[in-house]
Image (cartoon, rainbow, N blue to C red):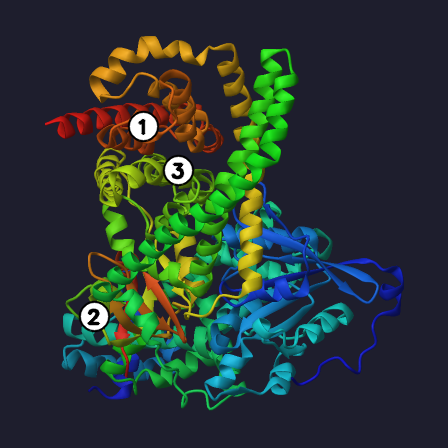
Amino acid sequence: MPGRGENYFISAKLARRGSSLEIALAGNPNVGKSIIFGRLTGVGVTSANYPGTTVEFVEGQAKFMNMTITVIDLPGSYSLAGNTDEERVATKLLYERRPHTVIAVLDSTRLERNLVFLFELIESGHNVVVALNMYDILRKNKQVIDVERMERFLTMPVIPTVATKGEGIDSLLYTSIQLRRKSKFQVRYDSHIEEMISRLEPQLREKDWDLPLRAVAIRLLAGDENVISRAPPEILELSRRMREEFRKGHNEDIVVHIQRDRFGEAGRIAREVIGTAQTARKKPSLVSDLTIKPSTGIPILLGVLALIFLTLVFLGGYLEGLLVGAYSDTGKAYFSDLADQMDSKYAKGVIDGVSLSIEAMLALVIPYILVFYVMLSILEDTGYLVRVVSLLDGVMHRLGLHGRAVIPMVVGFGCNVPAILATRAMGSRRERLILATLITIAVPCSAQTAIIIGSVGNFAGIWWALLIYVILMGTLVVLGLALHRTLKFEPTGLMVEIPDMRWPSTRQTAMKTYIRLKEFLTIAFPLLLAGSIVLETLMAVGALQEIIGPADPFMHGALGLPAFTAVALVFGILRKEMALQMLMVLGFTLEGTSNLQDLLTPHQMFVFALVMAVFMPCLAAFAVMVREFGARSSLMVAGASISLALVMGAVANLVLSL
Amino acid sequence: MQPEIVEQYLKAIYNLTEEGGTAKTTDIAELIGVAPASVTEMLHKLADKRYVKHESYKGAVLTGKGRKVARKIARKHRLLERFLNDVVGVRGRSRHEQACKMEHALTDEAEHNLCKIMNHPVECPHGRKIPKCEKKISCERCADSSMSLDEMKEGDTAIVSHLTCGDKDDLCEMLAIGFVPGSAVTVEKKVPMGGPIIVSLKGTKVAIARERGKLLHLSKAG
C-alpha cells in the first residue's frame, strides 16, 4: 500500500482533548462501505432509522490513540440530490451532523460512476478522503490506478484499500483524523450553466447558507428540494426563471446537463488515472450469468429455497431440541416451582407467561430466526438476492408488485414483523399494503413452519407438508392477482444495480444478523411477553377454556377438528409458535394424552396446520401493521385472513373427507 | 446552392419580415452593412429570380421559393448560435458574426445532426424561434429515429441520446446511476416474462424495468 499521511502530524489538540470526532462513510451502494465500517469500529454498533423514513444508517465507535471517534455509515446512494429516500437520509445526516471528515468509499473497478458521487461531496464543501476500495479486484483485472496523479487532480488524499482484508484501513483512519483542508477541485459545467451559476452566486449571501455558495447555486438550478425550501423568494424566483430559460433553449432539463458534465469529467479523470483501462476486460462470471437467465436461474432459485428450507428444518430443529431440553431442566423447573408457591391464580399466570416466553425465545428465536437471518444476510452479501429480484420482477409485476417485493417476502419466512417493516422499501402505500397482506396471509413465518413441520411433516409425511406450501403459494398468486385488480395502480419500474457475485464476509454477516435480531427482540419480543402473560392469566382463571363449548359446532362441523383446538387457534393469535404445544397441553388435560398422533388424525392435522398457516398474523405482526398502515386496514387484513383461513380449512376438510 | 450573398440577403429579409410586414430597403442596408443603392440593385436581381416581390417605396417580401431558402439559412444560423453559445461558450457580437460565416458552409446533413445533438432547441440565444426543419416527421419522431431501450436486442450497444422522463425524481435517479446522454449502454439480457432488461453501463450491470427502459432513447454507436 502506498503509505499516506506518515509525514503528517496528528493534531495535538485533538489528541489531547480525547475529543469526540465524527467521521462519515459515504458512497454508492455495494462498494464495501459497511465492511470498512466493520473494520473501523468494533462492537457496540447501533442501527437507527431516520425519523420518518426506514432507510437505516449505522453508527459505531472507533478508537485511535486515546480518541474515541464516532463513525457513521450513511446509506448507500448514487447522488446527494435528494430524489430517493437513501439520498435524503444521507444528505440530511451530512447536513445535520457536519462530520469532521467524510470518507468517500469508491469502488476502484467502477471509478467513473463512483467519481460522480465524490464530486458532489466535494462540491458540498466537506473535508473528503477517498478510500479506493476493492483495490485487489482491480489488481486481479491487471489494472492499476495512478494514485498520486489522482490526488493531484482532485487535490485530496486518496488511499487504496482492500476492506475485506483490512488493507489500508489504518492509514484511512489516520488520514481522516488529521485532515483539515478541503479539496479545491471543481467540475466545470457547460458554459451556459456556468454563466447561470455566475449570475446566481453573487445574489446569495454567505450567512444564509452553510454550504459553499457555488453548491447552493448549482442545487438551486437543479431544483433540489432541500435548498429550495430554504431560499429567499427573490432568489427562488430568479433560479426558477433560469431553469425555465434553460429548458426553453435546450429542450431538456438542466439536471440532465449537470449530470452529463459530471460524468464527462469523471470519465476524463478515470481515463487519465487508470492504466490499461480498456485492454483488460473483465471476465464475465459464469455463476453470475446463470443466476439471471431464467432457464437456469429458476432451478437455481428453487434449489436455494429448498436448501434454506432444509437448513431451517434440520439445523433449526436440532438447535431447538438442544436448547429447549437444556431449558426444561433448569429455567422451566425453577419457574414452575416458583409458580407452585404462589397462591394467586394471576401470579401463577404471570410466572407461567414469563417462563413460556423464555421458552419461546429458545425454541423459536435462536434456532429458527437466527439461522434464518444468517442465511438471509449471506444471500444479500453475495449479491444473489438482487439477482432474484431481477429474475422475478416480471412475474411480480403481474401481481401488482415490484421485483423488490421478493426481499420482504423472503424475510417473511423468518418472521412477519421485520417483513412488514421491510415493505417500506416499496414505493406507494398501496403497493406496501398489498405486499403486507400477501405476507401475513400466504407467507408462513418460522412459527407457522414449525407447526406445519411439527404436525403434518412429522406424522402425515413430508409430501403433505409440501402440499400446504403449494396451497400457500397458490393463495399468494390468486390473492395477488385479485388485489391487483381491485386496487388499481401501476407499480414504479425497477432499477437496480447488479453487483458482482462475491463471497460474504463473516464480520459483515455477524453484524447484519446482530442488528436484525436486535430489531426483532425490541419490537416483537415485548409483545410476545405481554401476550403470553395475558393468555396464561386467562388460562389460569379458566376463561379461555370457556370457548370450547360454543366453538364446538363450527370446529367439528365445518373443520372436522376436535373442539379443544379452538383454544389453540385463539392462542395462536397471540402466540403462534406455541399453538402446537398448547394443543398438547390441552390434549393432556382433556384427553389424557399429549401425543399429537393420538389427538389428531393426519387428515385433521393437515386441516389444522393449513388453518394456522393462513390464520391471522400474531399479535406482534398485527401491532406492527397498525403502526404502519393504521387500525382500519390492519383490522381488515386480520379479518380477511381469519375468514380465509377458516374457509380454506373447511374446504380442505370437505375434500379430504371425500 | 445559391451564392452566399443571395443567402445573406434572403436571411436579412426573413429576419425583418418574420413578424409580418415588408422589409424596407434602408433596414436591409443597415442589417447587411451596405449602401441602400446596392440593396435596391440586389433586390431587382432577386426579384428576377423570383426570390422576392419588390415594390418601390413599399419594400420587399419573400416569395414561396425565397422563403424556403431563407428559412433554411435562418435555421442554420440560429442553431449555430445556440451551439456556439451553449457548447463552445462564444459570447457577444463575435458569436453572431461567426455564425454568419459558418451558416453558409454547413451542409443539410450537418444541420440535421446538429439539431439532434442539441436536442431540438426551439429558440436561439436572442430568443428568436428556430424555424422547423423540412423533414416530414415531427421532432419527437426524429428523436425516436433513435430507439428506446426496450426496442434494442440482446447484445446491442448504443449511446444514450436523451431521456423522456416526466417525473423529476425518476429522471434524477436514472441520471445518477449513469444513464446520461453520451454514455454507452449494452443490452446483456432481456429477462423473459416481462422481466427487466439487464444492461451494462460504465462497467456495472443494471437491471431496469421495461417501462422505464422506454424513457431512455439511444442511437446506435458510430
Residue A207 sits above or below residue A329 on the image: below
Q: In x, y percent, where is residue A507?
A: 58, 62
Real-space Cα separation, disc 3 to disc 1, in angstroms = 20 Å
The residue shown at (49%, 87%) is A143
**Secondary structure category for the residue under label 2:** loop
State the residue position of label 2. B145
Residue A570 visible in rendering: no
Q: In x, y percent, where is residue A634?
A: 40, 27
Tell me: A203 left or right of A137.
right
Real-space Cα separation, disc 1 to disc 2, in angstroms = 52 Å
State the residue position of label 1. A641
- Viewer-proximal residue, A446 or A605? A605
Q: Identify the mark at residue A481; answer none if there is no mark.
A: none
Chain letter of disc 2 in the image:
B
Tell me: A42 left or right of A414.
right
**Secondary structure category for the residue under label 1:** helix
Do tags 2 and 3 sit on the same chain?
no
- Viewer-proximal residue, B76 or A455? A455
Disc 3 residue type (three-letter): Arg
The residue shown at (41%, 41%) is A446
Q: Residue A24's quadrant in the figure?
A: bottom right
Residue A262 sits above or below residue A621 on the image: below
- Viewer-proximal residue, B211 or B180? B211
For the residue carrying disc 3, how many other residues have a C-alpha within 10 Å: few (<14), some (14-19), or many (20+)?
Answer: few
Q: Decide: marks 1, 2 in contact (CB < 8 A)?
A: no
